[in-house]
Image: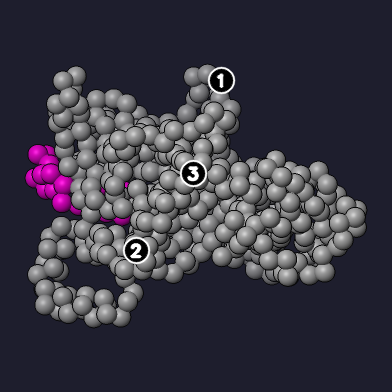
Amino acid sequence: MKSQLRISILLLFSYFLSLCAEKIDDSIHYYIQFTNDLSIIKEPPALEDSESSDDYVRIMSKNNEQFLCKLPQIVPDEEKPVEYSGLTAGKLLETILYKEKLCSYLIDVYWTYQVCHGRYAIQFHEDKMLNGQISRTEYYLGNFDAALTASTNENIKPQTRRIENEDYPYYSVSYNHGTTCDVTGKPRTTDVVYICVENVQNKILSVTEISSCHYEIVIMTDLLCRHPEYRISEKRNHKILCWNQDAKNDKDAKPMSLQRLDDFHDTTFKREFTINEVEEHEEEVEEGGVLDEKEYQRLKEIQQTGFVLGGVKRFTAKDSLANAPSVVQHTVNRILTGEDCIIAGTGWWKYEFCYGKHVIQYHEDANGQRSEILLGVFDAVIHKEWVKLDPKNRGAIKGTQQIMQLNHIYSKGDICDETGAHRNVEVRVRCATADHSALAFSMHLTEPKTCQYVLTIDSERFCEPFQFADDYGLIEIIPLGGIRTETTTAVYTDEEDGVVAEEEEEEHGDEDDAKVHEEL
């Protein structure tokens, strides 16, 4: 299999940029493929000719590895005028969002943000007092300003802005005359920015205070996708093919230092965030971040065992360091198997999330004594029934041409004294950058209702595995070698397994349904 590596983590590509600055546009996506098969590079130039060729370049690595690289020919796409006679972007929002008085919510670490489209935007925080009453702190971020919105969007062709490494056409709506700001002495204001994201219904992507008491709220909605001017343009990937004349096979075609760097990312996991189970001995790395030969061979042996993603890959994740094969392998074998648990919390309570297993709230005193509350455990049967009740907002949530979020329910937690019912927690695992790092995690927990929790976890590490999830948001993992073993989060498609599952469901169907509806 030919090795591929995205340019975002390839220092080698900077050399191409310096040689071919006039030919390469950063709005075009490239990837580099290494091979030892010269026959796939048709009509390679002679050594002396390649130095001045626009189609080929010869380079040498610091380990004296020789490469001949063929550059792709890029033909710019001709922009064709868009023929559209439907509703304008403003009318699309007005006809559906405003008329039906729909609202969108975002639960952050402390604040909850609410945008009631065409009416107002607020942020609020609720505290449960000792007497059981709820104390609410609330600020209006602005009220809908129809006149200012119309003047802001008077241009026929929408403007674009970069959001999550893509250029999105957007429609901006102004909200003014909010609660007076203590800092400026003026009313709070908000720009609500709508972008087209297929199959996403009015979800808040981000809230940013761009200046004192002036906010920007980005909302993803498929309503704008009905207008062709607001659809994001598709970008093609172009291959740069590099022949390694010193490699014995395709597996060794990638530069040695690059292969070691790839393996090195396996060891960054423990340095980026806290995990529950730490291996007895840490990987030792030479100064400068390069593994020694003994450690390099040990990591290669580890890669021969463990689990891999199964099922069908439905979408392609965006470029990221977290999508490097070694990082994905680590995520699958440590996080998705539940071997390593993610821990967060800086106050009295800490939270432990073990994927596909449980969510625990705990406190550990100075003597190491641990008091814990079970918030929920994962049950695939209950989870599927929970998704069926609201399939658009549960299970796998698709964003722009990829799955961006998985919503799972963890139920059967400890009994809540206030409600007399089991605790449960909705876990929202998102493909999103955490703490400005491709490998880190961020996690926060809120309690919108008594003993009913929402746990949100962000990391780019989830982006690649998400693309294998089914509609229930379940990811299949299988051992290397193809022998399937049952895990709580796996969904299998083998005909033999399917027959067994159907027989068991027929035998215990009534009993399972009763338990599921009781839990829900």
Q: Which residue is mark 2?
A: 478
Report whether residue 9 is seen.
no
In the drawing, what numbered circle is on residue 238?
A: none
Given residues 484 and 346, the one toward you in this image is 484
Given residues 286 and 362, the one toward you in this image is 286
The amino acid marked with disc number 3 is Tyr
Q: CA distance from mark 2 to mark 1?
A: 57 Å
The amino acid marked with disc number 1 is Thr
Q: In this rendering, would 5 be left or right of 402?
A: right
Give the crowd class for mark 2: few <14, some 14-19, many >=20 residues within 10 Å: many
Q: Which residue is mark 3?
A: 296
Q: Quick one: SS at disc 2? A: strand
What are the residue bounds of the magenta stretch?
Answer: 405-427
Residue in the image at 90% along x and 55% along y = 48
Give the quarter of the image for residue 80: bottom right
Which quadrant would the N terminus be assigned to in this image?
bottom right
Q: Quick one: SS at disc 1? A: loop
Residue in the image at 58% along x and 40% along y = 191
Q: CA distance from mark 1 to mark 3?
A: 57 Å
Establish if 212 lies above or below 14. above
Q: Is residue 414 magenta?
A: yes
Q: From the image, state whether disc 1 or disc 3 is nearer to you.
A: 3
Q: Is residue 85 magenta?
A: no
